[in-house]
Image (cartoon, grey):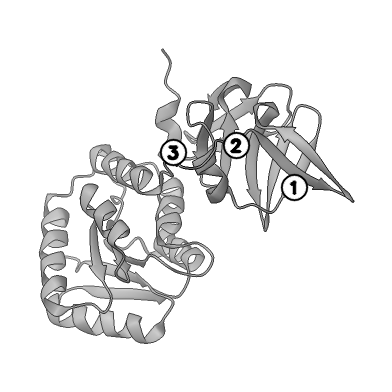
Amino acid sequence: MHVTPPTALIAEDEPLLATALQAELAHAWPGLQVVAKVGDGASAVAQALTLRPDVLFFDIRMPGLDGLDAAAELADAWPAQTATDKAFPALVFVTAYDQYAVQAFEAQAVDYLLKPVQPDRLKKTVLKVQKALTNHTQSTIDFEATLGQLRSLMTVAPNPSIEPLKVIQAGVGNSIRMVPVDDVLFFEAADKYVRVLTASHEYLIRTPLKDLLPRLDPNSFWQIHRGTVVNVTAIDSVTRDEAGKLWLQVRGQPERLAVSRLYAYLFKAM
């Protein structure tokens, strides 16, 4: 009986570190085939969708999409699992020493490697991943657990030491408009700006969404996508298309907003 060898993708923006990790993997897991090495998050998502590897080694800090964002985007784009589909890959994050990141990974039981990768630590990771692949079923249980882990890692908790945001200061020409936060229907990341949409106006601000999130009331503003945060009171309906993807409709607005798989759990009928 022919057994297909396990495959892996390495996403690391420093070529020397990517090569070093591949060399260490060759010693720790000789049967693993590294099918691709990429240097940024967007390429990691594209190659993972094309190659469907069994294991992903994602550097946390990469240009464009970082490792967590890339994993979340990949999870959102991964085909809906059936009995014949390949299960979502096992995730291993690679990071320079960061106590907060390490604690977060450990709390969510997500495996990680610290740079520079140490052979003994890599062996432990390999054993853990091999066990996970052996026990891997094609059910959605594993995938839902992965979504939960990613969601927890990406959640930006409100900072009690920072004053909650009450007004958005949006530049309009030579003036600054003071926009009450309660009037905002949704925030949406767009290139280098964030769109701030109210019932009557659209503004562009330069403050990144990740900087706004800790100052927004999580009971009033829900993150529904990596780049979208919506005012709960502005939500009119959420519908599911033929592909199973959720779309949100804001009251009085023609455009629909995509709901990521990570946040689909927010919308369940009472």
Label 1, residues with CA under 10 Å away: few <14, some 14-19, many ≥20: some
SS at mark 2 in the image: loop
Of the residues tagged 3 and 1, which is closer to the observer? 3
Q: Which mark is residue 165?
A: 2
In the depicted view, which residue is nearer to us: 143 or 244? 143
Residue pictured at 44% horizontal, 76% vertical:
13
Return the residue at label 1. Answer: 204
Which quadrant is home to the N terminus?
A: bottom left
Cα distance, mark 1 to mark 2?
A: 17 Å
Q: Secondary structure at mark 1?
A: strand
Residue 156 shown left or right of residue 122 in the figure: right
Q: Residue at x 43, y 53 (%)?
A: 74
**Dots 1 and 2: beta carbons under 8 Å?**
no
Disc ID at residue 160: 3
- Residue 264, horizontal then vertical, whole percent: 44, 32
Q: In the visual, does 77 lie left or right of 22?
A: right
* Residue type (three-letter) at the residue carrying disc 2: Leu
Sequence-first tag of 3 and 1? 3
Q: Could you say where residue 39 lies in the image, as x and y percent from the top left?
A: 45, 75
Q: Is residue 126 left or right of residue 163?
A: left
Horizontal and vertical percent position of residue 223:
51, 37
Answer with left or right where residue 102 lies relative to residue 120: right
